[in-house]
Amino acid sequence: MSLSSRSQSSVEQSAHIEKQLLLQEMMRQIANVQQKFQSEGEDEERRWMMARTSDAKVAAFLKDSTVIMLHVIDAIGELEPVNGITISKRFGIPRGSVSKITRRLAEQHIVQAESLEGNKKEVLFHLTPIGKQIYDLHKQLHTHMELNIRKFLGRYDAEQMLFLITCLQDTVKASWVRDATDTPEPSGEEESGRGNRSEGDSNAEAEVNGATPETAAISEIVAMLQQLDARSLKKAKALLQAAFDD
């Protein structure tokens, strides 16, 4: 083997070892994120809201509330008066779960149910004064989190944010259960588009749309988060919360 060939082989071997070490570190960090989410998550949000209310009834409800209960309250607050079918379709919550939760919330005087005249089967839901306080608190929490997300993402430049967007998109499509060979590969056209897209192209596109590259990337990430279902959004939130505390 020639000197140049041995040198090339050594470089490739070093690159392979470096990649394996990076993969191991990524797996450790994923485990750390999972552990952090399991130990905090809902409890941290609940504590944040409880610290910002002086109403004992609101605090008592928040202490035992679940994420899906808060989602139903959000749905009613945004759409009231609204029926269970609309809540289910709009927010992707099973109809059976909506029925159970709205019944429980009515018993706790968080929501009020009323039947339409001439159609007793059609039930519309409103928030009670306590329910409105909970709805407003939850909205404040989301606004607070969005500001933190924007501050956090502001540390990255446009190219880095575009890379993060790609990672998030690929993560949503991937499965950690199926074998890697079963995961659909990007099409040649998609790969070509990614490979040929330069930072200059991204900057130019952002400027045409009247925004800086950084603002455009942040908007795209926020748009992606808004499209996630409740389960996926919960996972994404945990990843971002873990990054905030680093």
Image (cartoon, rainbow, N blue to C red):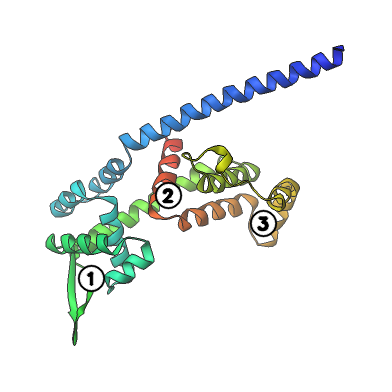
Number of numbered discs overlaid on the protein picture: 3
Q: To which residue does mark 3 refer?
A: 206
Q: To which residue does mark 1 refer?
A: 126
Please name the amino acid that badge 3 sits on.
Answer: Ala
Q: To which residue does mark 2 refer?
A: 232
The residue located at (42%, 34%) in the rendering is 33
Measure the alpha-carbon separation of dots 2 and 3. 28 Å
Q: In front: mark 2 or mark 3?
A: 2
Query: To which quarter of the image does residue 94 belong?
Result: bottom left
Mark 3–mark 1 CB contact (< 8 Å): no
Report crowding for label 3: few under 14, some 14 to 19, many 20 or more residues within 10 A (C-alpha). some
Query: To which quarter of the image does residue 207 belong?
Result: bottom right
Please name the amino acid that badge 2 sits on.
Answer: Ser
Q: Who is closer to the viewer here, 242 or 129? A: 242
Please name the amino acid that badge 1 sits on.
Answer: His
Report crowding for label 2: few under 14, some 14 to 19, many 20 or more residues within 10 A (C-alpha). few
Measure the alpha-carbon separation of dots 3 and 1. 42 Å
Q: Position of residue 43 (x, y in %)?
A: 27, 41
Upstream in the sequence, badge 2 or badge 1? 1
Q: Who is closer to the viewer here, 58 or 72? A: 72
